[in-house]
Image: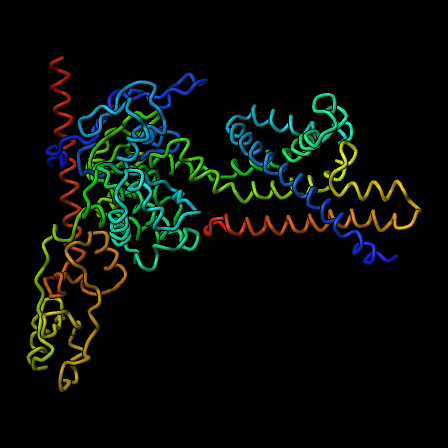
Amino acid sequence: MPDRTDAGRPMLRLRELTKRYRGQDRPAVDRLSLDVAAGELMVFVGPSGCGKTTTLKMINRLVEPTSGSIELDGEDVTHVDPNRLRRRIGYVIQQTGLLPHLTVGANVALVPRLLGWPSARVRARVDEMLELVGLDPAEHRDRYPRELSGGQQQRVGVARALAGDPPVLLMDEPFGATDPLTRERLQNELLRVQAEVRKTIVLVTHDIDEAIKLGDRIAVFGERSRLAQVGTPDEVLGRPADPYVKRFVGAGASLKRLHLVRLDAVPARPFPTARVTDDPALVRDLVVRSRSGSVLLLDAAERPVAWVAADDLTPLPADLAGVGLPATATLTAEATLHDALDVMLGTDGAGVILVDGDGRFRGVVGLDEVMAHVARLHAESRRHDVAAAAALGSAEGAA
Amino acid sequence: MSFTEWLDRNRDQVRELAIQHADLCLTAVVVAGLLGVALGVLAHRSRLATAAAQAGTSVVFTVPSLALVGLLIPVTGLTRDTVLVMLVLYALVPIVRNTIAGLRSVDGAVLEAARGMGMGPVRLLLRVQLPLAWPVILAGLRVGTQLVLGLGAIAVYVTRIGLGVLIDAGLARFGMPNSVNQALAGTLGVAVLAVAFDLAWQVVGRLTTPRGIRA
């Protein structure tokens, strides 16, 4: 698989970054080197105490590196004025850190004001940012942080971090303190916002599932910021670099990989269909001849309406309105195989109905199609392992 | 003579002494407020400086007020300044303590986020730390004010100013006609001032506490 970041120039270059705290004989971060490409969402994941947060905070120099260098967009920023640097780097933390004595609008306006933007531009930007994170500006601008829910506060935190239009965004466990439902929604929103703004994002989490879901690439941290593996989620799940990564990724790696495959990677199976307006007798013939013993009814706009089996048509109804099992299990091609599997296990239909953006029927994906794809993934991993082992063997032979 | 009759006849003197008393105390609170907040700001960052500031101001409390006056007289003489210095020293204790406590109570996440956005130390202090610590500092100022109003009565032993004059005269002539009325006028005067100042602080608090952190 081609590396998604090869084309992008690095927005962030960390070189031999080291942090030693006084009174500790071992460095907290030891000669870490890493590039993050422009527009890439890089996730630092690892157990607590592995130095991932320290590394993150060295990027905006809330933690001053003991040695090593940081480059931002080609410029060495290891020794520039940290306050000016931080205005170019958005920062989101778990506890949001909204200033409680300022309104939501004033919080979002902080960095633009520090940058000295004219007030009309600041006002416009505040509204733009609130809209971006899904908060109605008129309703939320003049409220105080404590009047918002945790999820809304975190959204304001993201809006505030993006307000100064920084090229880089640092996020330290941004969703760690929210309940699972809110977390999932915020994660989806981050992906949506990121698709829109395309910032270079470094996000720290200890949750491997979050890393897999959000990351373009994942950096798995071991003890003292050892980079155990840096790669795409698929690489980390499918080809863990060492036993440590394998253990960290944990059980269920195969299931997790299903999160990474979109439904359009799997060939949808055609399925016999009929119109609600068709003659019931003709539909019954179709049902009898079909392999699965059922037919999918579509409305005039080709949207799925109901599954119809032979039982539904005896005795033969006058027309097909309201007949059969409502066809609710629909997904678009953007959904993942994991979503599809979830829907299949939740309903006992013939599979998941694939529809396009307008809800028009495209095909059916069943358990067989999903299993065939999983088998293909396994075969790929095995081939890769064999190839890697062969490469290793020849390298050793040459040495 | 009843108390109200006495008060009616001596209204001008009582009013003048009350104004003196209020003026003395207000000056002491303003000076102690500026000094105390400054000390608190300087001290709150380091544990050592905090301990030193708290110990230093607490020592004042262990010295009886009259003894403190006695210590100051060789330096500043039998003047209003001697009283003022004493009052400032006492008022500093709650103000410094509360300033430090208030600044320390500011949520670390808020500070980290503010620093992460590129706020320097001065901006951080003026725009974040002091506004957020303000309710606690305000409480210190209120306590300091009450302290100073009560202690202001002993100014009379240094120089004859303030409502202490009435209390002292009444007690010195105890048993003579109107001695009780006189002492009572002085005591009630201090109480009335204390209530008035406290109401004033409440108004100030209402006007200066940001809405987002108002209780």
**Which residue is at the front of the view, A218 or B134?**
B134
Q: Which x, y percent locates residue A238?
A: 20, 37
Give the residue displayed 87% in from the left and 49% down from the top: B180
**Left or right relative to A3: residue B27:** right
Give the residue displayed 13% in from the left and 73% down from the top: A297
**Which residue is at the front of the view, A265 or A166?**
A166
- Residue B5 visible in rendering: yes
Residue A16 lies in quadrant: top left
Above or below: residue A214 compared with residue A268? above
Q: Which x, y percent locates residue A224?
A: 35, 24
Most distant residue in the right direction: B175
Q: Which x, y percent locates residue A97?
A: 40, 42
Q: Which color scheme did the rendering employ for the protein?
A: rainbow
Residue A222 lies in quadrant: top left
Q: Which x, y percent locates residue A173?
A: 35, 40
Give the residue displayed 22% in from the left and 26% down from the top: A71
Give the residue displayed 12% in from the left and 53% down from the top: A264
Residue B47 lies in quadrant: top right
Question: Quarter holding the C terminus of chain A?
Answer: top left
Question: Quarter holding the N terminus of chain A?
Answer: top left
**Which residue is at the front of the view, A354 or B86?**
B86
